[in-house]
Image (tube, rainbow, N blue to C red):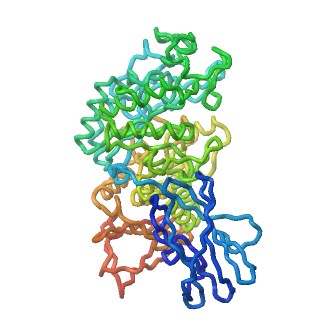
Amino acid sequence: MSEPFVFDPRCEACKTPFGAAVCGQDILFRCRPLACEGFSHCALVMHHEFADTVQEMELALTGPEGDRLCFSAAVAAPAEPELTWYHFRLWRDDGTGCDLDRTGYRSDGQLDPWQLTTYRESHTPEWFGSGVVYQIFPDRFCRLSSPDPEGMIGNRWVHRDWSESPEWRPDPDGEIRNRDFFGGSLAGIASKLDELAALGVTVLYFCPIFESASNHRYNTADYTRIDPMLGDEEDFRELCAQARARGIRVMLDGVFNHTGSQSLYFNADGFYPTLGAAQSRESPYFDWFSFHPWPKDYDAWWGIRTLPAVREECASYVDYIIENEDSVIRRWLRAGASGWRLDVADELPDWFIEKLRAAVEETDPDAFVLGEVWEDASTKIAYSQRRKYLLGGELHGVMNYPFRNALLDYLKGGDADRFREAMETLRENYPPAAFYSSMNFLGTHDTARILTVLGANHVPGSKAERAAYRLSPAERERGLALVRLAALVLFTFPGAPTVYYGDEAGMEGWEDPFNRGAYPWGREDKALKARFAHLGGLRRQRVSLQRGGLHWLFTSGPLLAFARELPGERTVTVVNASAESHCLTLPWPAAQALDRLTGRAFPVENGVLSLALPPYGGLLLT
């Protein structure tokens, strides 16, 4: 054997099957030290974290393989969902030896083990991961008429000019209250459904739409009522029906770790006629919150007093949100939603998410549950607890911030091989259905605009400077070139490509609220929008881009090439993220290659495709 490694879990010569395992599944491990090292024994040592047990099994010596010895054993994965850390112990007949971990041979006991995720098989709806998602910040997408905020919760005011910048300056009390509204509505979104369908969109993900005192609506005031500035429940039902008629589903944002201090449930300012927890110990919602002492001091999300934290363990709260026949989760699925995105999933207990998913599946077996998780969700620790998001009973998928981080690092001058390594780590750690159901994106309401990130030469130091910042013509030109490459990878990589409203139109902006401007209707970058629409159409047309396996063809420096493959269909993405031209050769099984972005055909000679890639060049080859 010519392979230089002793054990590589990503190589079928060492471990099958690849990656995560189903509960009880047999896994074949093969450890292959050089014969000259003299090892006569090998054991697999597995620490099962959730069960808190250690399992050690000696592997059988199954014979030489060239200059190597092969020790192997078939091991049953744990019967219950588990996170296992494993390494190998090698020793000789005289008792000398060492451990083998991800870093190689070592005798210091400071191990860096490999990871094995064991999950329970469960149904994951295919429509999310195979589709194209469009995220909308509802107040800023489309306004049909200027609303009157009189009588609505919160001291709201409405921008007269749709093209104005969001308010970012503190009020006289030094607070940023997010009370400026632009007046986008559900009817406005409905009026643009044909344009969204033309972009290839199959899923609309809305930031919160329930009544709230702020424009972002993450401080929910009433989970049972659409914010009146957006419309009402009938508008929502009609929007869902019109969207579904175009092959588009709707996903809602559920903020269930905290409410607003001005909410029906807390009612700190007495806006609602019924008693809230801040007003009376006799309130039906009093037990939802932790006071110490009542009423002035209470637990709040990250200490923000306008966001009182909810006691998820309170039985009446669980009943209200999840278990009641007319619970929040169930009623909005019945009204037309097809899934829920869980805000700050790290702040919700595992059991709460498990109950929520059970209620979702009972109400609509084909509905999807997505979680906001910013790290590798298979190893996430929150509040000193290892989380079990993807083990079969909680989330179907998560927001893929690692994808965004790795892609931006590559496009801003990093090595394509680091992008490959970051994605292979997720592919190895996640159950396959979860990997293919990840929400991939270039930006969200919580990040700076992708065009600004990729185009700007520097980050202004003050918030006032960032508010006024606009890309120079040269910065914008470079940024657009890189956004086109980012979109190419986004739409062709496993997972659900997600477009944050306006990114396809060339919107700029640093962090919140500068990334939450009003959609520039009539002022879009038409060429960029056409590129996104073309990629969205290809994603909907080519099944290999929806569900095809991932095969890396080349990853080095600025050059990235990978294939998505199914029997009978292969699609290859090629990217040059450099400001310089580069050449790349790839084996190719056909007489020519067709670039689906331009229609250009490339000849193939003796099974080899030779490509001359211009600066910031990208191809989508079939």
Within the image, what quadrant is residue 139 found in? top left
Q: Residue at x 30, y 61 (%)?
A: 543
Q: Position of residue 11 (x, y in %)?
A: 51, 74
Residue 75: x and y in percent read 51, 68
Please state if 609 lies on the left or on the right of 302 as rendered. left
In percent of width and height, residue 93 lies at 71, 84
Q: Nearer the viewer, residue 498 or 75?
A: 75
Which quadrant does the C terminus fall into?
bottom left
Q: Is residue 262 above or below residue 604?
A: above
The residue positioned 63% from the left and 85% from the top of the image is: 34
Residue 442 appearing in the image: no
The answer to whether residue 399 of the structure is visible from this angle is yes
In this view, the residue farthest toward the left is: 245
Camera-side residue: 257 or 489?
257
- Vertical order, 169 against 106 (above or below): above
Residue nearest the observer in this picture, 282 or 90: 90
Q: Tell me: residue 478, above or below residue 231.
A: below
Q: Position of residue 94 (x, y in %)?
A: 75, 83
In-image side of 293 versus 507 (left or right): right
Q: Quadrant of the N terminus?
A: bottom right
Q: Is residue 435 above or below residue 207?
A: below
Picture quarter containing residue 514? top right
**In the depicted view, which residue is nearer to us: 77 or 354?**
77
Q: Residue at x 65, y 80 (%)?
A: 41
Task: Check the image and name the residue furthest to the bottom.
Answer: 66
Count of numbered circles on the image: 0
- Judge from the rendering whether residue 517 lies leftward or rightward of residue 83; answer left or right: left
> Residue 56 occupies which quadrant of the picture?
bottom right
